[in-house]
Image (cartoon, rainbow, N blue to C red):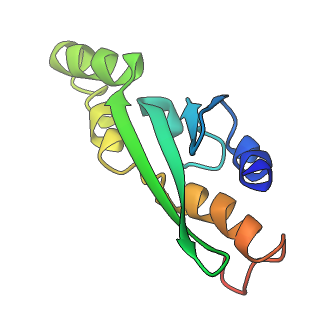
Amino acid sequence: MADLAASCASLGGAQYHSIDAIHIEDGKMGIDLNFVANFRADVRLRSVGDGSWDVVTVINLTPSGLFWAGVVGGFCTGVLWVLPVMYFLVDPQRAYIQAIDRVVYGGSLPVGY
């Protein structure tokens, strides 16, 4: 659990720990277009026997203030509509998968990461 918490620290934000989970508030580092969304993630560990673990990650996205400014500004200027469109292009999975894989592969990620 300590190795996973250290690896998830690379995502930034605030971490809170419980018995079987790491809760991350605003872990945005390494995520493209991260300014249009707020992030909250729960990374849970569960032992499945034989020294192996199951990792379940739930990532919640909510629109940020810039998203709503783009919605309102889009009606007024017609240009700021781009910000709400960017919200639908945000994909935090890659950054969180890399943080988990750093623990699995011992810091050396496979080619292609």
Q: Is residue 8 above or below residue 50?
A: above
Report which quarter residue 19 is drawn in.
top right
User: In the depicted view, which residue is nearer to us: 67 or 17?
Assistant: 17
Q: Is residue 7 above or below residue 37?
A: below
Report which quarter residue 9 is drawn in.
top right
Q: Is residue 78 above or below residue 112?
A: above
> Residue 105 appears at what percent x and percent y?
76, 77
Q: Is 111 left or right of 32, judged from the image as shown? A: right
Report which quarter residue 25 is drawn in.
top right
Q: How many marks?
A: 0
Quadrant of image for the C terminus: bottom right
> Residue 77 appears at what percent x and percent y?
24, 17
Q: Is 1 left or right of 49, judged from the image as shown? A: right
Residue extending farthest to the left is 75
Q: Is residue 63 above or below residue 1?
A: above
> Residue 27 appears at what percent x and percent y?
60, 36
- Report the residue at 57% width, 55% height from top: 96
Residue extending farthest to the front is 49
- Report the residue at 67% width, 76% height from top: 51
User: In the depicted view, which residue is nearer to us: 63 or 74?
Assistant: 63
- Report the residue at 48% width, 40% height from top: 41
Q: Is 101 left or right of 44, judged from the image as shown? A: right
> Residue 80 appears at what percent x and percent y?
31, 25
Residue extending farthest to the bottom is 111
Q: Is 68 left or right of 90, judged from the image as shown? A: left
- Report the residue at 72% width, 85% height from top: 110
